[in-house]
Image: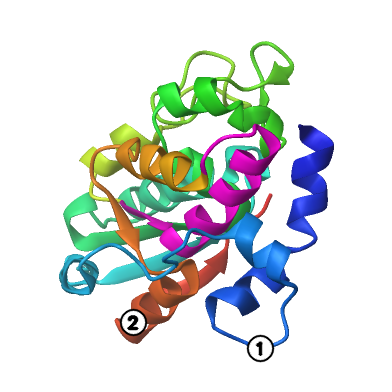
Amino acid sequence: MKSNIENSRRKFIGALAATAGIAGLNPPLLANSLPSNPIPSMNINESEAWMEKIKGSHRIVYDAPEPHDGFPFIWTWAFHLTNNQTGTPDEDLTAMVVLRHNAIPFAMKDAAWNKYKLGEAFQITDNTTGKPAVRNPFYIPKDGDYPIPGIDGIKRLQERGAMFCVCELAINVMSGFVSKAMNLNHEEVKKDWLNNILPDIQLVPSGVWALGRAQEKNCGYIYAGG
């Protein structure tokens, strides 16, 4: 399965072209990569309304297109920690994390990780076992998930006011690759992934859409690499 997903990633740009309706794409790629209706399923007004939650004197948006060993969440925690240390409370901060491309599994519940072998598919290692993760290691982290103790996971960061969203375009495309590798129905896999999005993580039309909207609302941009 791993090699199939790796090969599929190389076709990601082609699949994006299909989504945009660009002519000349190989029809089998379109059929195997995207659902019959690639138009975002969420109400766009919900995404726009969610963006209105951005607040505070200090605003940042973290671009997370890759897992990066959990650094999108480490940097979010660090943003809160150091702003608190320099006199700004959580209530006067916004840290937004945009989960897109290969980081989308972090928006999903453990059940999806186990069922679809997301750690193997997206090359995410469970630091406590050294094997491909079959759970979301950074939602409510265990000892050993982060390189040092005391770093907040997604759930705790949400409680502190951090905002998380996930790219539906990537879910469209990547669920196609995974469903093909596992010989499953694409529409059913995509629906299951959407149903497994964690509480309070907002589905947005695309990650780049969210990054653009956040910067329009005066969020500074940081690439959330290691």
User: Which percent across, then down, holds residue 12?
Assistant: 70, 64
Q: Is residue 97 above or below residue 61?
A: above
Residue closer to the observer: 87 or 59:
59
First-in-chain label (1 vs 2): 1
Alpha-carbon span between mark 1 and mark 2: 36 Å
User: Which percent across, then down, holds residue 97?
Assistant: 42, 56
- Position of the N terminus, as image quadrant, is top right
Q: Residue at x 42, y 50 (%)?
A: 82
Residue closer to the observer: 125 or 181:
181
Residue 37 left/right relative to 178: left
CA neighbours of label 1 inside 10 A, class few (<14), some (14 to 19), many (20+): few
Q: Is residue 222 above or below residue 128?
A: below
Q: Is residue 62 above or below residue 137?
A: below
Secondary structure category for the residue under label 2: loop
User: Which percent across, then down, holds residue 150?
Assistant: 45, 25
Q: Is residue 76 above or below residue 55?
A: above
Q: Which labelled disc corresponds to residue 218?
A: 2
Q: Main secondary structure of the magenta part?
A: helix
Amino acid type of the residue tagged 1 in the rendering: Ala
Secondary structure category for the residue under label 1: loop
Q: Residue at x 51, y 22 (%)?
A: 115
Amino acid type of the residue tagged 2 in the rendering: Asn
Residue 210 lies in quadrant:
bottom left
Pointer 1 residue: 23
Q: Which residues are magenta?
A: 163-185
Is residue 31 magenta-colored? no
Residue 215 left/right relative to 180: left
Is residue 165 magenta-colored? yes
Answer whether residue 12 is visible to the viewer in this image.
no
